[in-house]
Image: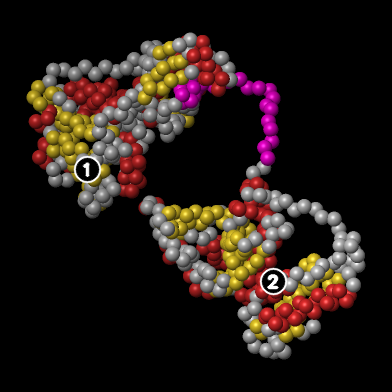
Amino acid sequence: MRTSVLWLNDYLDRPADATEQAAALTSAGLPLDGDGVADNGEHWQEIETTSNRGDCLCHVGMAREVAAVTGRAVRMPKAALPATQGDAAASVRVKNHEPALCPRYTARVIRGVKVGPSPEWLQRRLIAIGQIPRNNVVDATNFVLFELGQPTHVFDLATLAGGEIHVRRAKDGEAFLPLGADAKEVKLTTNDLVIADRDRPVALAGVKGGALASVGDTTTDLVLEAATFDAVSVRNTSRRHGIASDSSYRFERNVHAAEIDAAADRLAALILEIAGGTLEAGVVADGAPLPPSRAIALRPARARQILGFDVSTARMVELLDTLGFSPRVTGSGASEVIETIAPARRVDVEREIDLIEEICRLNGLDAVPVADTLAIRVPRRNPIERGTRDVKDLLVGMGFVETITHSLVAEKAAEAFLPAGATVLRVDDERAGGEPALRPSVVTSLLRVRRHNEDQGLAQLRLFEFASAFHHAGGTHIERPTLALVADAPTDARDSHGGQGAFRLMRGVVERVLYMVAPHRARVEFVPAPSARSWLAASAHVVVDGAEIGIVGVMDQRVLKAHGLEKPTAAAELELRGLFAHYPPENAAVELPAFPAADRDISAIVAEAVAYGDIESTIRGLGLADLESVSFVTTFRGKQIGDAKKSVSLRLVFRKPDGTMKSEEADASVARAIDALRSKLGAEIRS
């Protein structure tokens, strides 16, 4: 907010120079952000405001803050309206069709004005803050805007078809020509709120006036608009059409409906003073009822407890009274309460803690005690954060690079990754451009990164990202926190076995991750699922203790091609939150065995369709005595075995807890295992 030092002093009982104004506002949480000298030689200052302090976007608002900090009093501008003639309701009719988007709309009528240059004092005030004077009527609206923070607008009554004003939504494709020498006609949508006469829009509500009903040199009769509009609606319309104004900037930060009348009185009085004319009687208004005043109670004892230093109840009352909260003390001692009524302009103050914040900043942040030492307690690290960090470190150690990608993708890219029966979630925002879909899998984002790096000449790359995936199913929005991984096939596996090499690499990575985050006693399985995901040509479900937590597989060539890639690529998508909740896993230490083990290898030729898990479960299901472990060794395929068959080698380890395992005992158990593999799986035993 750009302020004029002289203009701000108009509202203080005694003037403050530029340095004092800046210091007071900075101590109140409104820091100086630059200053300079205007074309007319007056000193201006740029004051930084937060988005919830729309009440400070004017000189009276800034003067109120300076007064509260320095002990001054605020002198509010007067608006003495002369006698009226006629009836405004007979000259203009107002119909508010959208009270939710326009809580209150008011119109007043002044006839017989003479449009011309503004008086020198008014031009000087506007020039001091970088504004360009136009004419006495338009300058009056700008003056009230920067004085009280209430945007207003003035129409030429003669140009309003039917003498009607309608606050309505625009028709789809309806044309509107904004004010401005270089303005271009825009096409509106039904999401835009407009001020229209009987036939056409004459203003874009809260954003910009229209050229077709603007005040010109020949204008004699005026309609004065003072209204308020929904902040989100104004912001969306402003961004949709790329039109911004000082008015939209303020409406986007909320203007309360109860503030309208005072600003309208001030505008009417000012126009009558500098442009002449006669004010017609009455205010033509339409909208929702004014919201009730907000009563907020403050416990002084509670305020002192939170602030950490002593502030007297009288000082609290003084500060709140300066800000217009009408404080009143009730009770005494521990039951003492300051009852307040929040001014309508202070839409940011809703609770007791907000009042405590006001007292703190206006009493002076330098009064807050600063201890030489601070006692801290180091909390236990969050298991999800710790697990995530450790997995990241592990993956980086295995040659992976972490990415941070945008959650929006093109719809075509999203559809290829949708789970069965799910639909894409879309963002209804023009800024999304050609990528309005929330990604159903982070893998699509990683492939995009992979393509970019390939274009830059990087031949080999492994990527991972912890991020959420989204889709819509069963009438609800679903968000899945996932770990996504993408890796090229190893350089020695790009030819005939490229896909297999990529899969083996990714499976090994997933196993290593699960070895870290899952208990060692957990049963980890990779269950074949050739058609589980359309974006995978071959895949397996990752199952931990019977619960599916993700999938790993080789990317489908069509999906790779759509992303501009050709090399065999493996991908995995894991949901680790359940395992992270108990991270690090409790893995009890066990005593080292006292006696040696006996191990035996079995090589069984089975049909290609037989999974290793079937072989292992068949052996474990026998309940062999002293069987300590069953582990995979290797798989062999070749002409010696025949088509559609494979030779699976595994190792059985036997160990007795109370003595040395004898060879004949181990051999007897192995014989039982071989018989079971032959009878149940049709295996041929090679050794």
Viewport quadrant of the N terminus: top left
The x and y percentages for residue 496 are: 63, 81
- In magenta segment, residue 564: no
**Is any atom of residue 373 visible in this view?**
yes
Q: Residue at x 10, y 26 (%)?
A: 87
Label 2 and label 1: CA atoms lie apart by 71 Å
Viewport quadrant of the C terminus: bottom right
Residue type indicated by callout 2: Ser
Against 439, residue 78 (above or below) is above
**Label 2 crowd bin: few (<14), some (14–19), many (20+), radius 10 Å:** few
Left or right of 377? Residue 59 is: left
The x and y percentages for residue 11 are: 35, 17
- Where is residue 166, by image quadrant? top left
The x and y percentages for residue 319 are: 45, 16
In the picture, the disc for residue 168 is 1
Label 1, secondary structure: give it: strand
Q: Residue at x 56, y 14 (%)?
A: 310
Left or right of 591? Residue 562 is: left
Q: Magenta span covers which residues?
A: 352-380
Looking at the image, which is closer to me, 624 or 480?
624
Residue type indicated by callout 1: Arg
Residue position for label 2: 617
Q: Residue at x 31, y 35 (%)?
A: 247
**Label 1 crowd bin: few (<14), some (14–19), many (20+), radius 10 Å:** many
